[in-house]
Image (tube, rainbow, N blue to C red):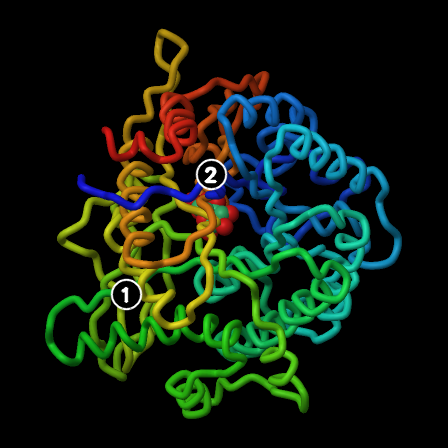
Amino acid sequence: MQINKRFPDSFLWGAATSAYQIEGEHLTHGKTLSVVEKNMNSNYADPSVASGHYQHWEEDIELMRELGLKAYRFSIAWPRILPNGRGEINQEGISFYRHILDKLKAYQIEPIVTIYHFDLPQCLQEEYGGWSSRKVIVDFEEFCEVLFTQFPDVNYWLTINEQSNMFQLPYLMEFAPDVPLEKQKYEMNHIMTLAHAKAVKLCREMLPEAKIGPALGIIPNYPATSKPEDVLAARHADDLRTYLFMDLYMKGEYRSFVWNYLVENGLEPTIERGDMAIIKSAKPDFIGINYYQSRVVKYISAEAEKKELKLNYDGEDDDTQFDNIPGIFEGAANPYTDKTRWDWEIDPIGFRYLLNELYDRYHIPIMITENGIGTLDQVTGDQKIHDQERIDFLNKHLQQLQLAMKDGVEIWGYMAWSFIDLLSTSSGFRKRYGFVYVDRDDHDVKKLERIKKDSFTWYQEVIASNGQYLIDR
Ligand code: BG6
């Protein structure tokens, strides 16, 4: 592949994780339960051990150094820092993250810290309904203030991970049974956007040198055919699933198609005086993008039955059910792309397409905060993990990222998902993402031995050559 543009020397070659997916010790050492931990799929591993990072963090950072990482994205668990959601600080939690940050700095690995990765303290859910109440904004701001006070040396902050996914993945949030679901989602989305904006503003005041932005999970939508109805359906799907959030973050506005749709369907959130001014005044420094796949959509009539997204959890049967919004769009499989075992469309070109689309619309630097593939990895007789599928996936996506940079898109860094095998939010340890294998399975935690996969060596070469290795292959 002919690509001329070189990666800048400052490019942040990285990898990512999140707290509840790797740490373990989820109800000990002062930590309390979070919503996502409570709602985890009970067929798979629970978060009590996860990857054992709470004990193995030093060994893990040694491996990051060996890999040559320039940056590491991880999240700080709100219920580990503030076990009651607010008030008393768990000093052991502060020390845990302080040690991690110090060791990363010692190895010149830039920490990129996610403030909220799905782990609302369960006590706040029980006290006032979590993200359905404006009380959460005050508590979230307090959490941010604690982080900015305790960790002023962090240069890159991510406010909220995948705000968009609360519309798709039921286990990330809890909803009241007596209020229409869609209505609740848009209310919560508005409240979460306000919380994000408060975090940005507070960061500007307390840490003016730091950079801050959200991390959004984005699936670009393609029309199933060139039928004008399908083309419009894809545009509307993008509006409702991507640009709703992007416009709020970047312009402080509800885009008109979305707002009219909400009003027509009685779904519009409560907007109090001053809300939009706060949101508008908190423009991020950069946008974090989590990209895994694209999607095909087609028009569906208003009379069709409403369907929610149903995931293929076990990676065995082709049983994904796409969601729809009757009268607007329904999802469909793409006949032109390969799929992962879990039916996720593999679409590296979609990555370049999306990056161009976002940069053209918003002219803001982009950081790839997640990109990766879930696979069934096996240790072979030679004690190795030959994860060629991951290497192919990442190589192709990075080539497209490089082409996007050549197209003119400003990209600061790339955090592969994930640094180490972790508890997949949907499918436990069966579905692995890491460069480093963790020897455990869903039902037996074994000794949690770390083993470098083939992709570890591949990424090491990519980083050491500042991306040249991608071109030479
Ligand atoms: C993103 C999340 O949605 O996708 C991660 O930010 C998650 O937490 C990743 O692990 C992959 O999804 P899954 O369901 O395969 O773990």
The dot on residue 13 is 2
Outermost residue on the left side: it is 226
The residue shown at (76%, 52%) is 147
Q: Quadrant of the N terminus?
A: top left
Whether residue 205 is visible here, answered yes or no, is yes
Expressed as whole percent of the image width and height from the top left, the position of residue 346 reads 26, 46
- Left or right relative to 251: residue 225: left
Residue situated furthest right in the rendering: 88
Q: Residue beneath label 1, please?
A: 221
- Horizontal and vertical percent position of residue 341: 29, 39
Q: Is residue 233 left or right of residue 417?
A: left
120 over 276 or under it: above or below = above
Residue 211's spot in the image, x, y percent?
A: 61, 57
Give left or right: position of 133 versus 331: right
327 vs 92, nearest the viewer:
92
Residue 80 tag number: none
**Residue depicted at x 33% and y 39%:** 315
Judging depth in this view, the residue of 68 and 124 nearest the camera is: 68
Q: Amino acid at mark 1?
A: Asn
Name the foreground residue: 414 vs 185.
414
Quick one: 352 or 32, which is closer to the camera?
Answer: 352
If the image is split into quadrants, where does the C terminus sit?
top left
Q: Which residue shows up at 62% across the image and 78% down it?
A: 281
Tell me if I can see residue 170 in this picture: no
In this view, 58 is above or below 231: above
Q: Residues within 10 Å of mark 1 (few under 14, many from 20)?
A: many
Q: Residue at x 36, y 25 (%)?
A: 458
Residue type highlighted by circle 2: Trp
